[in-house]
Image (spheres, grey):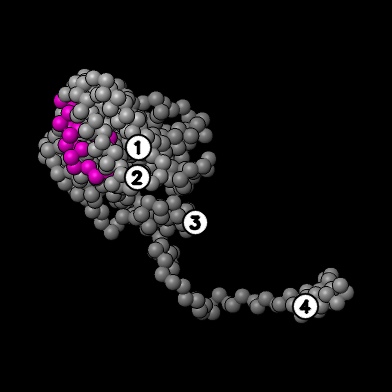
């Protein structure tokens, strides 16, 4: 045991570990700083997406970088405000801003469960989007609040994108006051994921500044939920940037900045005072605002006027949503439109199944019969249609041989697919049904 201790002490001494401070080596002397006029050699550093100025002349105020921006004074201080004015004929991707005004928020009212939307026009709504210092948490700030609204102009009606920006955290009360004054003239809100993120965040900031707000109580059309219900089957990602490219026909310029980088750009601005990289953030928020207008037009048009020219997958998604909400007549019409298009086989079966189930629930099982037969004739693994056919012939028309035939077809399909190798409750249900049908046929 002693040998091991001695060996450990020897290793510690070799490493320079000593007991107490008496034998510690003195600290290395620090070299004095070079004279102010001595040239400094800077070490090489790899490229970085942020550009920091080498001389003070490179710093430029926001008003210079963003023409038209101004400091607006309020009773709570000042806030930087920038307006962009768009004519209604402005082309944004494949759509014009004026397209939205041909539709009404009423089209979305039954789908988002807010009947108040039907009482207003889109001119009564404020489009809203925030850029924040983080994703969540009590310390998260909305350092930029973008709003958009329709208003009369000297050259006719236009759409205004207004951006409120915090030069530092002390500007927040002024920003909230200006936002509240604008909200006073609007009835409701249009956002993209605002119900889960922007509105709770702003509501919390109003509360922290002891300012009342009714943001959560206003009529609100959050475009994210309809976008997912209508386009997730076809497009997959329903992030706003993804929808711009795959649905709206829009490609952003190189002035844009990815959303995940925005908080660090603002934090770097607060540390350095250099606002040049923030121009990209203003552009990002501005395009978000305009894209919400054209996306709202796409949503309300499809909800109110589904057309045979629409993509059949989108029609299937809409029909299923209508059926889930109990809009039987509209769902039947939409699903029949989708069936006329070129759907992938799996979605084609799902579309026919939704339509057949809808007819069955409305007491029109005989009309659903050819739909079940079509599914059964083209499927290679799903026995749902076979089971519906067996039920129909057993209970609706009492044609027991037909009921037995479709039950046996379902069992054969399961066996050919190898699904009997493991326990399958559907197989047991079909076997039990076949035995019952055979007894009933024998007794008859």
C-alpha separation, residue under disc 1 versus residue under disc 2: 9 Å
Question: Residue furthest toward the front?
Answer: 442
Q: Position of residue 193 (x, y in %)?
A: 36, 39
- Please tell me whether mark 4 or mark 2 is closer to you in this view: 2
Tag of residue 419: 2
For label 2, the crowd category at 10 Å Cα-Cα, with few meaning under 14, some 14 to 19 and many 20 or more, is some
7 and 410: which is toward the camera: 410
- For image coordinates 30% across by 30% down, the residue present is 434
The boundaries of the magenta stretch are 367-386
Q: For the residue labelled by badge 4, is the local secondary structure a helix, a strand or a loop?
A: helix
Q: Which residue is mark 3?
A: 271
- For image coordinates 38% across by 46% down, the residue present is 421
- In the rendered image, residue 375 lying in the magenta stretch gets the answer yes
> Disc 1 or 2, which lies upstream in sequence?
2
Q: Are marks 4 and 2 in contact (CB under 8 Å)?
A: no
Residue 288 visible (yes or no): no
Q: Which residue is mark 4?
A: 11
> Disc 1 or 4, which lies upstream in sequence?
4
- Please tell me whether mark 2 or mark 3 is closer to you in this view: 2
Q: For the residue labelled by badge 1, is the local secondary structure a helix, a strand or a loop?
A: helix
C-alpha separation, residue under disc 1 versus residue under disc 3: 68 Å
Q: Are marks 1 and 2 in contact (CB under 8 Å)?
A: yes
> Disc 2 or 3, which lies upstream in sequence?
3
- For image coordinates 40% across by 44% down, the residue present is 422
> Disc 4 or 2, which lies upstream in sequence?
4
Q: Quadrant of the N terminus?
A: bottom right
Q: For the residue labelled by badge 3, is the local secondary structure a helix, a strand or a loop?
A: helix
Q: Which residue is mark 1?
A: 427
C-alpha separation, residue under disc 3 versus residue under disc 4: 47 Å
């Amino acid at each position: 045991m002693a040998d091991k201790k001695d060996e450990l002490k020897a290793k510690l001494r070799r490493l320079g570990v000593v007991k107490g401070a008496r034998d510690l080596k003195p600290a290395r002397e620090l070299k004095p700083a070079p004279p102010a006029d001595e040239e400094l050699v800077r070490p090489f550093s790899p490229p970085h997406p942020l550009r920091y100025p080498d001389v003070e002349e490179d710093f430029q105020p926001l008003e210079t970088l963003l023409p038209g921006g101004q400091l607006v004074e309020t009773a709570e201080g000042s806030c930087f405000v920038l307006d962009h004015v768009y004519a209604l004929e402005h082309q944004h991707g494949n759509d014009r801003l004026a397209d939205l005004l041909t539709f009404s928020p009423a089209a979305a009212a039954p789908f988002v469960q807010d009947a108040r939307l039907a009482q207003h026009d889109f001119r009564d709504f404020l489009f809203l989007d925030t850029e924040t210092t983080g994703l969540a948490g009590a310390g998260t700030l909305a350092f930029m609040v973008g709003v958009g609204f329709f208003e009369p102009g000297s050259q006719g009606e236009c759409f205004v994108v207004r951006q409120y920006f915090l030069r530092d955290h002390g500007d927040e009360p002024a920003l909230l006051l200006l936002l509240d004054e604008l909200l006073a003239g609007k009835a409701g809100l249009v956002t993209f994921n605002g119900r889960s993120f922007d509105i709770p965040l702003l509501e919390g900031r109003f509360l922290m500044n002891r300012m009342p707000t009714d943001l959560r109580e206003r009529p609100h059309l959050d475009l994210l939920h309809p976008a997912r219900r209508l386009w997730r089957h076809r497009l997959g990602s329903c992030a706003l940037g993804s929808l711009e490219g795959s649905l709206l026909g829009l490609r952003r310029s190189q002035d844009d900045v990815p959303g995940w980088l925005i908080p660090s750009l603002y934090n770097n601005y607060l540390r350095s005072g250099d606002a040049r990289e923030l121009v990209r953030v203003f552009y990002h928020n501005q395009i978000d605002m305009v894209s919400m207008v054209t996306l709202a037009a796409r949503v309300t048009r499809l909800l109110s006027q589904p057309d045979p020219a629409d993509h059949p997958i989108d029609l299937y998604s809409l029909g299923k949503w209508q059926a889930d909400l109990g809009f039987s007549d509209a769902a039947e019409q939409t699903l029949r439109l989708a069936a006329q298009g070129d759907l992938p086989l799996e979605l084609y079966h799902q579309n026919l199944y939704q339509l057949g189930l809808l007819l069955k629930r409305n007491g029109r099982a005989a009309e659903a019969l050819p739909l079940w037969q079509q599914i059964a004739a083209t499927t290679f693994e799903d026995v749902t249609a076979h089971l519906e056919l067996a039920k129909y012939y057993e209970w609706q028309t009492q044609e027991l041989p037909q009921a037995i035939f479709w039950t046996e077809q379902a069992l054969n399909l399961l066996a050919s697919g190898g699904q009997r190798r493991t326990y399958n409750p559907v197989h047991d249900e079909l076997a039990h049904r076949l035995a019952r049908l055979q007894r009933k046929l024998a007794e008859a």
